């Protein structure tokens, strides 16, 4: 390695600038990069120990469904482990076209394009943002949307989380200052840290009034919300008011990979213009087949959506009965506000000691000083799993001083 003086070494970075990393060092708690595997029944083995898995985005419990894994295994045997090329060259299988047709049909759009990851789907949005365009982005949007917007050539304007009144003002100001600018509103459908939904009715009204396009990232809500599981747009009855959907197969559809769905001319443009599509190896065969199988199961088995949403509501009620703040969540993502990073790290460890794996989340994913334990519910969780999660929060909270020393019967069932 080249010898470079510290003052000019671009690789000289200090992780201790992160409050959560400092908390990990101070407490000896290590909540990240733990080795584990899911067992398919709402549980997991974390470094040799069986625990309740309350930190996984497999909302419908399809990633280990035998029908999904069998489809993946068959594709692996037939097509191999990888296409070893980009979609534009040798990386398009019949499975790519089948999955794209299934997604477009499911969402009622003219076309869809699948990409290697959900992150890359949101990076592809950059290709639609040219010089002279203005993008208006919710401050709580996922990092992949943030990066996609930054890669675009247009100007970026942030508005406070779900503050559509402020967004209206910003749109009016932009129209006055740059009357010829193209305008794009970009939002998560379901916010992954808070578990709340975008204010889609207000956003569609603003888009119509100000002549703006609307892009909705349905990573966490497509497959979960709405009468047919088509996401937040169907939930609000506004499927035809969204100009472009982005999404992923790694949440409700038990696989990995991303997609964009919308008008055919937009999808065709992205196929030939989005660098995250053009210059990446294509989605592998096993992931494609798993996604196709899971999409069919999710559509045919609505009980999974009903089950996971009911469990999440019961969990929120139980946590609130214990004195925890779960914010505005109305989905299987249930954030439990802890506060400072040190207490959050200790709380995470206490939960693991009680046999529950959840997610410790600090800045920049959430605001500084508002660290949360992020709990996610799966359709494959049982009522017993729910009780174990609540019991663990009661015990862990007493241990770190987050809840009073309540008797066991105070835990809501």
Image (cartoon, rainbow, N blue to C red):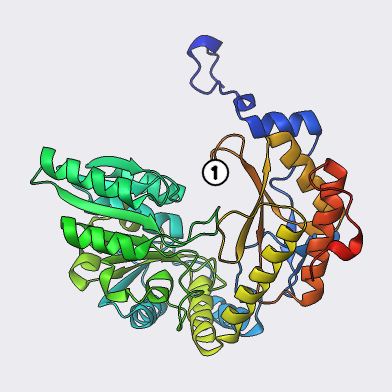
Q: Is residue 225 above or below residue 372?
A: below
Point out the image quarter for the N terminus.
top right
Indicate the position of residue 402 as horizontal and vertical percent values.
79, 44
Relative depth, front residue between 244 and 327: 327
Q: Is residue 256 above or below residue 369?
A: below
**Which sits in the foreground, 44 or 366?**
366
Q: Name the element at disc 1.
A: loop
- Along the horizontal axis of the image, is 263 left or right of 11? left
User: Up-down: is 212 above or below 312?
Assistant: above
Q: Is residue 286 left or right of residue 125?
A: right
Question: Would you say 168 lies left or right of 402 here?
Answer: left
Q: Position of residue 118 (x, y in %)?
A: 45, 60
Residue drawn at 55 percent across, 57 percent down: 328
Identify the residue at image location x=55%, y=75%.
Answer: 76
Neighbour tally class for label 1: few under 14, some 14-19, many 20 plus, Cα within 10 Å: some
- Could you tell me if residue 279 is visible in this image? no
In the displayed orientation, state which residue is furthest to the right. 407
Which quarter shows the C terminus? bottom right
| Residue identifier under label 1 | 365
The residue at the point 57 percent across, 38 percent down is 363
Left or right: 284, with 85 as reference point: right
**Residue 378 in the image, given as x and y percentages of width and height:** 66, 71
Residue 340 location (% of width, % of height): 68, 35
**Which residue is farthest left?**
180
Q: Is residue 23 visible?
A: yes
Q: Looking at the picture, tell me which residue is in the foreground, 39 or 222.
A: 222
């Amino acid at each position: 390695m080249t010898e470079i003086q510290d003052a000019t070494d671009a690789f000289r970075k200090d992780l201790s600038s992160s409050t959560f990393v400092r908390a990990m060092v101070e407490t000896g708690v290590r909540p990240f990069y733990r080795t584990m595997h899911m067992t398919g029944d709402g549980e997991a083995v974390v470094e040799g120990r069986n625990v309740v898995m309350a930190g996984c985005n497999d909302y419908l419990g399809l990633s280990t469904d035998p029908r999904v894994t069998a489809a993946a295994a068959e594709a692996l045997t037939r097509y191999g482990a990888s296409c070893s090329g980009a979609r534009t060259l040798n990386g398009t299988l019949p499975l790519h076209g089948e999955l794209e047709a299934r997604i477009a049909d499911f969402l009622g759009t003219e076309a869809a394009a699948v990409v290697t990851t959900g992150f890359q789907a949101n990076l592809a949005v950059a290709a639609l943002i040219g010089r002279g365009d203005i993008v208006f982005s919710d401050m709580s949007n996922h990092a992949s949307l943030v990066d996609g917007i930054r890669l675009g050539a247009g100007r970026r304007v942030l508005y406070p989380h779900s503050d559509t009144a402020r967004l209206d003002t910003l749109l009016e100001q932009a129209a006055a200052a740059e009357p010829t600018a193209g305008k794009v509103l970009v939002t998560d459908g379901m916010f992954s840290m808070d578990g709340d939904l975008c204010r889609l009715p207000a956003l569609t009204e603003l888009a119509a009034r100000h002549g703006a396009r609307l892009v909705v990232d349905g990573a966490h809500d497509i497959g979960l919300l709405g009468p047919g599981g088509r996401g937040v747009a169907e939930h609000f009855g506004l499927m035809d008011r969204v100009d472009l959907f982005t999404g992923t197969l790694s949440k409700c559809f038990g696989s990995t990979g991303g997609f964009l769905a919308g008008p055919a001319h937009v999808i065709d443009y992205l196929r030939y213009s989005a660098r995250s599509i053009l210059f990446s190896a294509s989605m592998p065969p096993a992931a494609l087949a798993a996604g196709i199988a899971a999409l069919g199961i999710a559509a045919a088995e609505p009980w999974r959506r009903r089950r996971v949403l009911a469990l999440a509501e019961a969990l929120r009620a139980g946590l609130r009965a214990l004195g925890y703040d779960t914010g505005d969540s109305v989905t299987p993502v249930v954030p439990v506000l802890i506060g400072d990073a040190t207490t959050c790290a200790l709380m995470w460890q206490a939960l693991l000691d009680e046999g529950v794996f959840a997610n410790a989340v600090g800045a920049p994913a959430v605001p500084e000083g508002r660290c949360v334990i992020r709990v996610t519910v799966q359709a494959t969780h049982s009522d017993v799993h729910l009780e174990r999660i609540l019991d663990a929060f009661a015990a862990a909270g007493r241990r770190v001083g987050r809840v009073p020393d309540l008797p066991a019967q105070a835990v809501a069932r």
